Image (spheres, grey):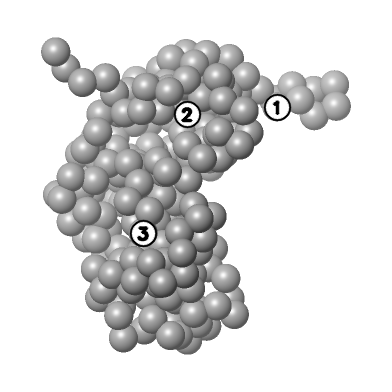
Amino acid sequence: MAAPPLIDLERVGRVYATGRVEVVALADISLQIAAGEFVAIVGPSGSGKSTLMHIVGCLDRPTSGRYRLGGVDVASLDGDALARLRGRSIGFVFQAYNLLPRTSALENVAMPLLYQGVGRRARLERARAALARLGLEARAGHTPAELSGGEQQRVAIARALVTEPEVILADEPTGNLATEQGAEVLAIFRALHAAGRTIVLITHDPDVAAVADRQVHLRDGRLAA
């Protein structure tokens, strides 16, 4: 019997109410992603990519339909339980890196483990190991301002990996990088996927999406044919 999908969206919709106006950000999205897949969610600005990312990443909830992550229906969880599921299951990589500016690369990578209650010594050991996987052990003591854009994004990837999540969710991860640095980051994602990691890549760029094994196209809040 085939394993159930790791990510399972069934007729998901998201509507935002702004005063008397309702804005439909997503409508009737059904999407399954298996463990170990590398999927790109592709679409222009305003297509609903960010809204879908927030739902998949348990940063937001759908207003209709059902979303299961690892077999868990997120609608059944309260805020604390949802945060625990997110922290355990999802590693985030953002376009703007989202690193703490006056904090070393090592402490930035260790931060998610603090929220999981991991002791300081174990946090730092695991953070050093994550940085070493990305070739950044020599930069562990540097702050983000002392790192190049490509190095900052690699620190962000190390931070996403340090909790050993089920899914890496990358939102326009090359958007702030020069072409060569972007290619290096995409090569990292390919290597992580080859090692068995599930990766969901959000992008507007068809060239970036091409590194994934499957592409899902969004337009006007709906899956495009």
Residue at image mark 1: 16
Residue at image mark 3: 162
Q: Nearer the viewer, residue 124 or 106?
A: 124
Answer with the quarter of the image where residue 4 lies.
top left
Answer with the quarter of the image where residue 213 lies.
top left
Disc 1 residue crowd, few under 14, some 14–19, many 20+, Cα 10 Å: few
Camera-side mark, 1 or 2: 1
- Residue 104, compared with residue 122, is above or below; it is below
Question: Measured from the top left, where is residue 15 in percent x and y?
Answer: 66, 22
What's the distance in space between the residues labelled 1 and 2, CA to CA? 17 Å
Residue 98 vs residue 89: left or right? right
Point out which mark residue 219 bears. 2
Looking at the image, is mark 3 or mark 2 earlier in the sequence?
Answer: 3
Report if the CB atoms under discs 1 and 2 are less than 8 Å apart: no
Residue 62 vs residue 42: left or right? right
Looking at the image, is mark 1 or mark 3 earlier in the sequence?
Answer: 1
User: Under tag 2, what secondary structure?
Assistant: strand
Residue at x 56%, y 25% (from the top left corner): 77
Residue kind at label 3, given as amino acid type: Val
